[in-house]
Amino acid sequence: MSYIPRLKKEYKSNVVTRLIKEFSYDNVMQVPKLEKIVISKGVGAAVNDKKLIDHALNEVTEISGQKAIATMSKKDVASFKLRKGMPVGVKVTLRGEKMYEFLDRFVTTALPRVRDFSGVKSTGFDGRGNYNLGVTEQIIFPEINIDKINKISGMDITFVTSANSDKEAMQLLSELGLPFKKKESSDNNSTVEDKKQPVIEDSPVEEVAEEAPAAEVEEESPVEEVAEEAPAAEDEEEPSENEEESKEDNK
């Protein structure tokens, strides 16, 4: 019995039936499928140092498990000192069992090693069912030995499907295990926080503004009472002095 990759079994047994129920296909042959995966890497600095192409070939070969080839320039560019036919990149195309094996290792082993990983972007579709994904560091793949690499560099991964729309292709890749970011949860959390903040900040300011004039009114009331009582005391003392003077004159 020939070997069948795990994701290929999952696709035939479960993914096909779920896609038929969701999109209501009339025939099994209408169900989209993954046709190939292309891994490409540009090496622009190879114009001055041709050894960089050899390093890139070895890295992509170890990652994909298939011999990679160098891509040549198609025209002369004088400003970059580039001539037609010079190697400027590396690529490899995976199909069949190697394609499913690479996708399985990429989803289960490589992506969890990405720093602060929260899902892949859902904006990489080209409108015809193909998805492009960029990797910034090649060290996320366990096949790469970090002590032997020349420098940290990235690569592009293209998933080519037979889907007619981006929605069908996105559903297919998500069923195969590719984790996409969810926009709704992030937007809802931001709106809830915006609604709560002004209510908490405004309430103490209003209380302080209302209490301030009340305290000033209470302090002014005792001052007025003292001012009113002072002349009353002076009026009582004056007639007593006049009475004493009149008594002495009579004597």
Image (cartoon, rainbow, N blue to C red):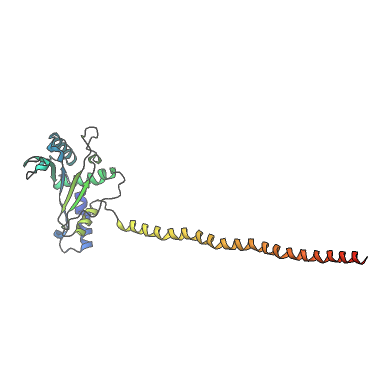
Coordinates of residue 68 in the picture (x, y in percent): 12, 40
Tell me what residue is drawn at x 23 percent, y 62 percent: 22
| Residue reaching furthest to the right | 251
Coordinates of residue 19 in the picture (x, y in percent): 21, 59
Image quadrant of residue 25? bottom left
| Residue reaching furthest to the top | 147
Name the quarter where the N terminus is drawn. top left
The front one of 195 and 111 is 195
Q: Is residue 193 left or right of residue 151?
A: right
Coordinates of residue 138 in the picture (x, y in percent): 22, 40
Image quadrant of residue 48? top left
Coordinates of residue 195 in the picture (x, y in percent): 41, 61
Tell me what residue is drawn at x 13 percent, y 43 percent: 91
Name the quarter where the C terminus is drawn. bottom right
The front one of 128 and 178 is 128
Q: Is 185 located above or below residue 44 in the figure?
A: below
Q: Is 91 located above or below residue 29 in the figure?
A: above
The front one of 248 and 64 is 248
Q: From where the camera sits, is residue 72 visible?
A: no
The front one of 111 and 16 is 111
Q: Is residue 221 left or right of residue 54?
A: right
Tell me what residue is drawn at x 60 percent, y 61 percent: 216
Q: Is residue 16 left or right of residue 209?
A: left
Q: From where the camera sits, is residue 210 visible?
A: yes
| Picture mark count | 0
Q: Is 92 located above or below residue 206 in the figure?
A: above
